Image: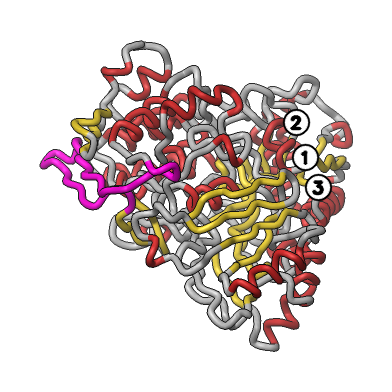
């Protein structure tokens, strides 16, 4: 999530949405009568999957951050202790030893280092078919095990030395390994529970165990998730909330109206209301780490232009990013003229400060767009540009519809190309764009960071990347990423990542659109709520609603 990415692929939503559950009033009245502290908010779609080793989306990351806990946590950009109360790193930075605290699962049994060893190896097991398996390639023999080059899991560099000690050996030093350990894929699961439920594991609330601050009490699919404080959590005294209700809908205006009616404690602000609430001093803003981009399926039969880099550049220069943000997002977000997120850390400063770059323009450049289109037409022996159409896949919410229509208008105006739009539910979009499916032309996608480093964006596009569902393969790019992942020279690593970014923009299967900023508002009584650009967002673990009732 980013994270995600974001997944990572992440839903194009500016705000959090909701539906009015039929038991809404009763639940709130019950909380008031008992004096329990309940936080209520909404998300824009059903959580597709809560299996830590299989989940990929921003909603799963957000919920998992509350019901599970990895070795560490990332909160407000800082690494904090989680299940691990301490850890040491060897002199060569290739062996990490984590000491686990006394902690329990929600059924009262202890959380052990063996649970982590099992989870890590499950992530890498080719039978799990995790799209995030590549995150475990930093671990010694992790990639070989995942690709079937070795079959003995004991050769993978993860070992429980005893119930409280986990040793992880790496292929090479990893600058951000502590941050990575907070990610959903590395959260523990217990072997007996996974085997008990088989393919149904994590499909419902009663098919999971929890070791985080909350437990998932109820999961009404497509409606709501109800979380309750975990009495077995090691730091339960610091948790102020008794219950969290997460409602589901894809209509942002409905969510905002429910907030106005007093039914939600915080909400994303629909674009049409941003200016009003800003003037009233009620609008809050933050960057959630997500980047929106167009992703092209270069293997689409009958549409060879989707694989043509000059065609993609024509699309990129035909889009007016400033106007898009003004029209669709009401000025909330920044034009993405490059690929790497501006928030990510470099050597000493932000990566984009150390390596300034701008590939695409903020405004449309119709002349340059047509120049690239003509090159593509010559290369493909196409005389009529109107034939170079495609279907733009996006989510089935109002903001996504406006976004797609705005791009449609820009391409019509600046290139003379007519595209169609296909809207589907968030979960279905993720399925259609899976690497093993690739049933789309071009998708309006988002990705959020899984950890604070440019690699979280760059390694998506290697030839064997689990989320590279484009058909794009570039040997030079693969070599740049491999070098950056294996060198112990951090300056040389950063240099190669910058080279990779430039190559991706010039030849790759994506066109960046914007770096997302969100506008939201909350009740005065809501405190301790953290909006993250890495990790679960919103992070309500230590939130409080004192004075709500």
Q: In this view, does 96 lie above or below 407?
A: above
Q: Can residue 519 be seen in this view?
A: no
Position of 285 with respect to 329 (left or right) is: left
- Dot 3 or dot 2: first in sequence order is 3
Identify the residue shown where x is 59% and y is 61%: 244
The percent position of residue 29, horizontal first and vertical second, equals: 71, 71
Q: Tell me the quarter of the image containing the C terminus.
A: bottom right
Q: Do the residues labelled 1 and 2 touch (CB within 8 Å)?
A: yes
Identify the residue shown where x is 25% and y is 45%: 100
- Dot 1 or dot 2: first in sequence order is 1
As helix, strand or loop, the secondary structure at mark 2 comes to: loop
Mark 3 crowd level (few <14, some 14–19, many ≥20, 10 Å Cα): some
Q: Is residue 467 visible?
A: yes
The percent position of residue 398, horizontal first and vertical second, equals: 82, 56
The percent position of residue 540, horizontal first and vertical second, equals: 51, 64
Position of 367 with respect to 507 (left or right) is: right
In the image shown, does 319 or 209 lie closer to the viewer?
Answer: 209
The magenta segment: 82-108
In the image shown, does 405 or 148 lie closer to the viewer?
Answer: 148
Q: How is the image coloured?
A: secondary structure
Q: Is residue 15 above or below residue 174?
A: below
- Residue hosting label 2: 440
As helix, strand or loop, the secondary structure at mark 3 comes to: loop
- Residue hosting label 3: 396
As helix, strand or loop, the secondary structure at mark 1 comes to: strand
Q: Which mark is residue 393?
A: 1
Question: Which is in the foreground here, disc 3 or disc 2?
Answer: 3
């Amino acid at each position: 999530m980013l994270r995600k990415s974001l997944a990572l692929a992440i839903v194009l939503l500016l705000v959090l949405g909701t539906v009015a559950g039929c038991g809404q009033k009763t639940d709130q009245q019950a909380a008031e009568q008992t004096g329990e502290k309940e936080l209520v908010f909404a998300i824009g779609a059903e959580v597709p999957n809560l299996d830590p080793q299989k989940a990929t989306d921003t909603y799963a990351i957000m919920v998992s951050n509350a019901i599970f806990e990895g070795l560490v946590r990332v909160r407000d950009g800082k690494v904090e202790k989680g299940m691990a109360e301490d850890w040491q790193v060897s002199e060569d930075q290739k062996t990490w030893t984590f000491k686990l605290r006394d902690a329990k699962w929600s059924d009262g049994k202890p959380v052990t280092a063996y649970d982590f060893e099992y989870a890590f190896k499950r992530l890498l097991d080719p039978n799990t078919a995790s799209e995030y398996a590549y995150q475990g390639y930093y671990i010694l023999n992790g990639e070989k095990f995942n690709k079937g080059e070795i079959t003995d899991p004991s050769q993978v560099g993860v070992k429980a030395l005893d119930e409280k000690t986990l040793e992880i050996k790496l292929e090479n030093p990893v600058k951000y390994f502590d941050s990575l350990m907070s990610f959903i894929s590395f959260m523990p699961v217990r072997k007996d529970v996974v085997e008990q439920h088989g393919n149904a594991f994590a499909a419902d609330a009663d098919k999971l165990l929890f070791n985080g601050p909350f437990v998932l009490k109820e999961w009404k699919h497509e409606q709501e998730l109800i979380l309750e404080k975990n009495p077995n959590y090691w730091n339960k005294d610091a948790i102020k909330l008794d219950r969290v209700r997460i409602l589901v809908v894809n209509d942002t205006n409905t969510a905002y109206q429910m907030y106005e009616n007093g039914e939600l404690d915080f909400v994303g602000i629909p674009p049409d209301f941003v200016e009003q609430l800003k003037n009233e001093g009620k609008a809050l803003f933050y960057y959630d780490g997500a980047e929106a981009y167009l992703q092209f399926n270069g293997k689409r039969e009958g549409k060879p232009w989707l694989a043509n880099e000059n065609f993609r550049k024509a699309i990129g220069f035909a889009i007016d990013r400033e106007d898009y943000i003004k029209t669709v997002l009401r000025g909330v977000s920044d034009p993405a003229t490059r690929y790497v997120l501006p928030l990510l850390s470099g050597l000493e400063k932000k990566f984009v400060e150390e390596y300034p770059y701008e590939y695409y323009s903020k405004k449309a450049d119709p002349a340059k767009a047509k120049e690239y289109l003509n090159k593509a037409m010559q290369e493909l022996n196409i005389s009529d540009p109107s034939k170079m159409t495609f279907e733009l896949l996006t989510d089935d919410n109002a903001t996504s519809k406006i976004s797609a229509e705005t791009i449609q208008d820009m391409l019509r105006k600046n290139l003379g190309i007519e595209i169609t739009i296909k809207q589907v539910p968030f979960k279905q979009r993720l399925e259609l764009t899976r690497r093993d499916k690739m049933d789309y032309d071009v998708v309006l996608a988002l990705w959020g960071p899984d950890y604070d480093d440019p690699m979280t964006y760059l390694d998506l596009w290697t030839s064997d990347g689990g989320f590279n569902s484009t058909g794009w393969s570039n040997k030079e790019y693969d070599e740049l990423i491999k070098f950056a992942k294996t060198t112990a020279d951090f300056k040389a690593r950063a240099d190669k990542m910058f080279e990779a970014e430039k190559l991706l923009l010039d030849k790759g299967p994506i066109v960046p659109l914007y770096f997302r900023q969100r506008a939201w508002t909350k009740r005065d009584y809501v405190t301790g709520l953290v909006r993250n650009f890495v990790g679960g967002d919103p992070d309500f673990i230590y939130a409080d609603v004192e004075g709500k009732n």
